[in-house]
Amino acid sequence: MSEETDPDLKPETLAAQSLHFLDPATGAVVPPLHPSTTFARDADYGLRGAVSYSRYGGPAVDQLEALLARLEGGAAALVFASGLGAAAAVVMALKPGDRLVCHANIYWGFRQWLEDFCPRFGIELRQIDMTDLAQLDAALEGGAELVWAETPSNPLWEVLDIAALAEKAHAAGARLAVDGTAAPPPLQRPLAHGADIVMHSATKYLNGHSDVLAGALATRVADDLWQRITSNRTGVGAVLGAFEAWLLLRGLRTLYLRVRHASATALHQASRLQRHPKVRQVLYPGLPEHPGHEVACRQMEGGFGGMLSLRVAGGRAGALRVATGTRVFLPATSLGGVESLIEHRKTIEGDASSLPEDLLRLSVGIEHPDDLVADLEQALARIDEEGEPQ
Ligand SMILES: *Cc1c(COP(=O)(O)O)cnc(C)c1O
């Protein structure tokens, strides 16, 4: 573990130095990797470190959680074996009869799980459009236990007003949890705007190198809900492994640089693509025309993220021409890595998805902006107005 860190240091500094880590035994400036699952006791039969067995955590997990709590400005953080593991842990802390109100256009994998789990567990699930606060008022009538939001929401990049949601949730006796995967620190800190819990698929920006599957939660206060989430994680063993935690600590060292760079490139891309004759619409909260731009300006700092979606000419065929025609953007799912990705979401989500056929999701990485612009331009040139191959 690191020594006590100066409380005035900026999150960026803490991330770059993994909380000013310095190994007391060796002077190493990088935390060591401890793959051990068990930790021996001393001569008095006391524990030498914080844990005895790795289902409860371990040196890298503890270090990572301490760092994430600082980056989010929270009282505590927990890491999980995946983003969905983290999200599910919040819902599993509810009890039968509780009401969960969630934004309808959230990450599809989580929505599918909620639709399966909630009815079987006796949780009343209400899906609404939270860009319309009147719908939230109606859904909260009679009270609720949890409000689940995601902003910007994947893959339409709708922006939800965290402060307004928190106020309404709290007035109804509910906690507000926000999936902030698409806008990690430094872009957005939901706890500072009144959210009770922030969740991340750490697989994405927090790690940033597309080589770790992980999830994270941070809480504003370590209350009874947090205690239930914590004991459930230990009970079911959903903790992140030591090696993944160690990799994630390394990824976090460059979080601020990566995210700011990707955000700047994405804004540049979005503005250029808006004028492209083969692009019908650009969905990006950084554009003044975006319906959530004003709220985004209020609750996001230093950029609007590296994620955007395009609706292109030529419908499904046009979109697939572009998705199969890039030479720099890689045609793969996921987001938040250093490499840029392009994806036709409708193909991935299948027939049940209500997403438009002409939508392409872009995850902008840290490559040279000119290469990314040139790549999309040559790929867009592959569609004609009817979407037939040229
Ligand atoms: C990827 C993603 C998840 C799920 O995270 P995993 O790490 O894949 O389990 C949840 N929410 C959002 C917004 C995501 O992009």
Image: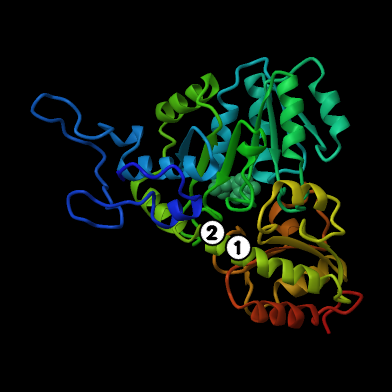
The foreground one among 126 and 266 is 266
From the image, which quarter does the C terminus lie in? bottom right
- Which residue shows up at 70% across the image and 18% down it? 173
Residue 376, compared with residue 333, is above or below; it is: below
- Which residue shows up at 77% across the image and 26% down it? 168
Q: Percent from the top left, x then y, of residue 261?
A: 60, 67
- Which residue shows up at 8% across the image and 28% down it? 43
Q: Which residue is mark 2?
A: 256
State the image quarter where residue 360 is shown. bottom right
Q: Percent from the top left, x then y, of residue 78?
A: 46, 36
Q: Is residue 77 left or right of residue 142?
A: left
Is residue 382 visible in the rendered image? The answer is yes
Q: Percent from the top left, x then y, of residue 264?
A: 67, 67
Q: Is residue 10 left or right of residue 189?
A: left
Residue 251, compared with residue 177, is above or below; it is: below
Q: Percent from the top left, x then y, of residue 309?
A: 76, 61
Visual colour scheme:
rainbow
C-beta proximity under 8 Å, tags 2 and 1: yes
Q: How far apart are the two marked residues, 2 and 1, measured between alpha carbons?
A: 6 Å
Amino acid on which disc 2 is placed: Tyr
Is residue 354 visible in the rendered image? The answer is no
Which residue is outermost to the left?
A: 43
Q: Is residue 338 left or right of residue 40?
A: right
Q: How many marks?
A: 2
Q: Which numbered tag is attached to residue 207?
A: none
* Mark 1 neighbour density, 10 Å: few (under 14) some (14–19) many (20 or more): many
Amino acid on which disc 1 is placed: Arg
Mark 1 close to ligand 1, CB under 8 Å: no
State the image quarter where residue 344 is shown. bottom right
Element assignment for label 2: helix
Q: Which residue is mark 1?
A: 260
